[in-house]
Image: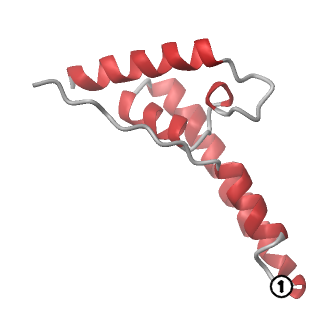
Amino acid sequence: MEQKLAFQRIDTASILEEIADRGLPRNAGTLKIPLNFIRTKLWQLAELAIEIDDPRLSLWCCQMTLFSCADPKSDDYDPKIFEKLKEEIFEKYDQK
């Protein structure tokens, strides 16, 4: 029986921005620095995912909208490219 993978998208950049700009008291602005550090590390993780070409990690990066082609708010977003990438990831994931 073929198992379908569920795909849920999480807008990581917006979540971090929401926490930094609206979720913190005004006097807790120093927390923006660690949030920006986390954002930077997540984008480095996305670069590594591309480099090592691991389907599970790539799928996770797509779900977290760390790839610009998977982020509907990005200028680079292209539904056709994103669907093709998703199919390739699912195909590789099924082979593991």
Label 1, residues with CA under 10 Å away: few <14, some 14-19, many ≥20: few
Q: Residue 94's x, y, as percent?
A: 24, 23
Colour pattern of the rendering = secondary structure
Residue at image position (83%, 85%) is: 25
Which image quadrant: the N terminus? Answer: top left
User: Is 28 left, or right, of 46 in this rendering?
Assistant: right
Residue holding disc 1: 25
Residue at image position (65%, 42%) is: 43
Residue at image position (52%, 25%) is: 51
Task: Determine whether 95 is above or below 19 in the image.
Answer: above
Q: SS class of the residue under badge 1?
A: loop
Q: Residue 85's x, y, as percent?
A: 50, 18
Quarter of the rendering containing residue 66 = top right
Task: Determine whether 32 is above or below 73 in the image.
Answer: below
User: Is 72 left, or right, of 90 in this rendering?
Assistant: right
Which image quadrant: the C terminus? Answer: top left
User: Is 45 left, or right, of 89 in this rendering?
Assistant: right
Three-letter residue code for mark 1? Pro
Quarter of the rendering containing residue 29 = bottom right
Counting the numbered discs, the total is 1
Q: Nearer the viewer, residue 54 or 80?
A: 80
Q: Residue 32's x, y, as percent?
A: 80, 69
Q: Nearer the viewer, residue 4 or 14?
A: 4
Q: Residue 83's x, y, as percent?
A: 52, 18
Task: Determine whether 79 is above or below 64 in the image.
Answer: above
Q: Residue furthest left?
A: 1
